[in-house]
Image (cartoon, rainbow, N blue to C red):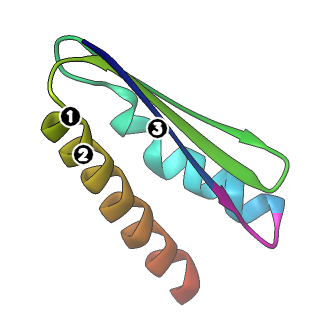
Amino acid sequence: MELRARVRCLYREERVAEALVRALSPDNVGGKGVELRTVRRGREVITTVRMEGRIETLLATLDDLLACTEAAEGLLEEV
């Protein structure tokens, strides 16, 4: 079964959104059958996930994505 998800986060400044896209770009490499794409549109960061498989795998992938996003946001707050 093909599964898809889109996560959208809006930030106050474009430079923060750009920094997050750069921080998340190494995670744009998915495993077999997983396609991840993170882009910036203005102040918005959009990640699209497409994969074949089970819903549990998609949820685990989204959980990893959100954990990485939260870590990157925390680092940016310190700078």
Q: Nearer the viewer, residue 52 or 37?
A: 52
**Residue 57: percent from left, percent from top:** 15, 35
Q: Quickly name the residue at label 2.
A: 59
Label drawn at residue 55: 1
Q: CA distance from mark 2 to mark 3?
A: 19 Å
Q: Nearer the viewer, mark 3 or mark 1?
A: 1
Q: Amino acid at mark 1?
A: Ile
**Residue 10: percent from left, percent from top:** 72, 62
Q: Which residues are magenta?
A: 9-13
Q: Amino acid at mark 3?
A: Ser
**Residue 16: percent from left, percent from top:** 70, 65
Q: CA distance from mark 3 to mark 1?
A: 23 Å
The image quarter in which residue 49 lies: top left
Q: Earlier in the sequence, mark 3 or mark 1?
A: 3
Q: Magenta stretch: dominant SS?
A: loop
Specify whether residue 11 is painted magenta.
yes
